């Protein structure tokens, strides 16, 4: 059974975020505006954290809490 990794490489993150260039991604990294981790020289981007960042949340945990709260209020 194959399990997909929740981590994106820099090239995958550029495509996922629809950024125009590699320099745009690394500018976000340099300014600490996009969540990332490093494995040696490799930059990795957790899709859950990136999604939370896109939606304006501090973390994936906060995003899950907001979604759960909305479900409770709607149900």
Image: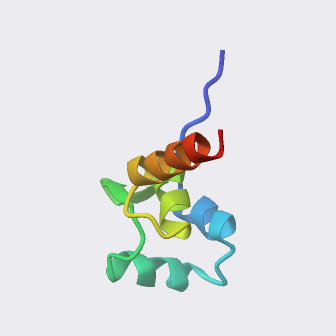
The residue located at (34%, 80%) in the rendering is 30
Count of numbered circles on the image: 0
Please state if 56 lies on the left or on the right of 32 as rendered: right
Q: Residue at x 62, y 59 (%)?
A: 12
Write the residue at 40% across / 47% down. Answer: 61
Give above or below for 35 relative to 3. Answer: below
The one of 52 and 6 positioned closer to us in this rendering:
52
Give the residue drawn at x 62%, y 83%. 21
Q: Residue 59: horizontal and vertical position, in percent? A: 39, 56
Q: How is the image coloured?
A: rainbow
* x and y, in percent, of residue 26 in the image: 44, 78
Q: Is residue 4 left or right of residue 63?
A: right
Quadrant of the rendered image containing residue 35? bottom left
Question: For the C terminus, which image quadrant?
Answer: top right
Residue 20 image position (x, y, % from top left): 67, 84
Q: Nearer the viewer, residue 71 or 54?
A: 71
Write down the quadrant of residue 38 in the picture: bottom left
14 relative to 2, above or below: below
Where in the figure is residue 37, as x and y percent of width and height? 34, 56
Whether residue 27 is situated above or below residue 54 in the rendered picture:
below
Q: Nearer the viewer, residue 37 or 65?
A: 65
Relative placement, left or right, of 44 versus 51 is left
Quadrant where the N terminus is found in the figure: top right
In terms of image quadrants, where is residue 54?
A: bottom right
């Amino acid at each position: 059974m194959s399990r997909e990794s929740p981590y994106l490489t820099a090239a995958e993150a550029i495509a996922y975020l629809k950024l125009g260039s590699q320099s745009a991604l690394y500018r976000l990294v340099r300014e600490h505006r996009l969540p990332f981790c490093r494995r040696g020289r490799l930059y990795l981007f957790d899709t859950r954290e990136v999604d939370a960042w896109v939606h304006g949340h501090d973390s994936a945990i906060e995003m899950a809490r907001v979604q759960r709260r909305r479900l409770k209020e709607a149900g």
